[in-house]
Image (cartoon, grey):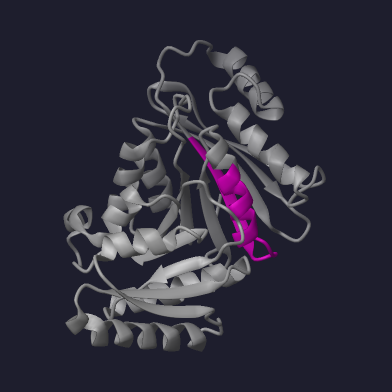
């Protein structure tokens, strides 16, 4: 399947949790319009124990893909497709194509069903085999030019499927991925984006990138810059000014811009509670991803009550 880099490409990792289907509704808002394609990905571990072979296996696989039963993870993707139909995002008239790729060590391999609308928009249901969930997501992100990858964080106590996504998976993906990642945690659709900025060039570029993305779903844009000390206020005010100029240059309006004083992690988490998404650049350290784990962005990602997007 060839990707069109001129279109807005969105990857949503589906694991059967309620949060992943809430994230799907949010993805639909971001991906609305004829310029967007959405891939729904479920990653399952390699399983050499699955039976079948030859013609019998081929017929079984064809039936599984057509009806969405039996193949591990396919029921979650089918539920997501049904939700897209219920919301009116797609309908039964979309043409479909089934694609299969052999994977050494797993008899069922990778499988995709690509649905295409009359206008050319695509919804892809992709069942990928990988040594681990995190590795599968990262491999998919490396293979295709997604504008954003959305990962749902399951609620405490919710049972996890074999392809379930937990904090360890999320941490690995966010740390190693080179693109934008949204951790969906109790996500709500219309409460706006709180974009947190510093005067760093990368932070300003990230703010502009997210503001454009937020405008796709009519999400209000708010800016926050935190000064740790009173003596840092001038730098925080400069960050707000630079980000505002960049965002307005992109044709997006800003609802509010705030400078706060205090611990950045605490301020961002507390002030971010009313918003759909808290947005941050990944790190002030360029080229050394291991330092992301000690950054403000990492602490906010881990400790926030709501959804967090890391922009690169």
Q: Is residue 89 magenta?
A: no
Q: Is residue 24 magenta?
A: yes
Magenta segment range?
22-42
Q: Residue at x 25, y 69 (%)?
A: 262
Q: Position of residue 296 (x, y in %)?
A: 25, 61
Q: Is residue 3 visible?
A: no
Q: Position of residue 6 (x, y in %)?
A: 56, 69
Q: Considering depth in this image, is 53 or 5 the residue closer to the camera?
A: 5
Q: Is residue 309 visible?
A: yes
Q: Position of residue 244 (x, y in %)?
A: 44, 85
Q: Is residue 31 above or below residue 212?
A: above
Image-based side of 110 in relation to 69, left or right: left
Q: Residue at x 43, y 22 (%)?
A: 106
Q: How many marks?
A: 0
Q: Residue at x 44, y 80 (%)?
A: 257
Q: Residue at x 69, y 65 (%)?
A: 33
Q: Is residue 92 above or below residue 76?
A: below
Q: Considering depth in this image, is 239 or 129 the residue closer to the camera?
A: 239
Image-based side of 77 in relation to 270, left or right: right
Q: Residue furthest right?
A: 93
Q: Position of residue 184 (x, y in %)?
A: 48, 49
């Amino acid at each position: 399947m060839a990707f069109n880099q001129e279109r807005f490409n969105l990857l949503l990792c589906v694991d059967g949790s309620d949060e992943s289907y809430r994230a799907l509704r949010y993805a639909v808002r971001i991906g609305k319009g004829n310029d967007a394609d959405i891939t729904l990905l479920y990653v399952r571990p390699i399983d050499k124990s699955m039976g079948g072979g030859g013609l019998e296996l081929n017929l079984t696989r064809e039936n599984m893909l057509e009806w969405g039963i039996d193949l591990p993870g396919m029921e979650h993707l089918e539920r997501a497709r049904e939700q897209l139909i219920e919301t009116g995002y797609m309908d039964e008239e979309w043409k479909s194509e089934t694609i299969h790729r052999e994977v050494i060590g797993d008899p069922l391999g990778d499988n995709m069903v690509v649905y295409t609308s009359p206008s050319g928009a695509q919804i892809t249901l992709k069942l990928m085999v990988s040594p681990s969930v995190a590795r599968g997501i990262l491999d998919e992100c490396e293979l295709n030019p997604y504008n954003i990858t959305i990962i749902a964080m399951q609620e405490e106590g919710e049972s996890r499927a074999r392809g379930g996504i937990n904090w360890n998976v999320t941490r690995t993906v966010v740390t190693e991925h080179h693109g934008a990642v949204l951790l969906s945690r109790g996500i709500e659709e219309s409460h706006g984006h709180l974009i947190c900025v510093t005067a760093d060039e990368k932070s300003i570029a990230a703010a502009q990138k997210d503001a454009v993305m937020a405008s796709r779903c009519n999400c209000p844009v708010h800016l926050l810059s935190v000064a740790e000390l009173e003596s840092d206020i001038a730098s925080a005010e400069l960050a707000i000014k630079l980000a505002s100029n960049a965002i307005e240059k992109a044709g997006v309006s800003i609802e509010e811009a705030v400078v706060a004083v205090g611990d950045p992690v605490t301020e961002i988490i507390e002030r971010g509670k009313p918003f759909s998404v808290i947005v941050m650049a990944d790190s002030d350290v360029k080229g050394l991803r291991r330092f992301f784990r000690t950054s403000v962005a990492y602490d906010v990602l881990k400790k926030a009550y709501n959804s967090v997007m890391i922009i690169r």
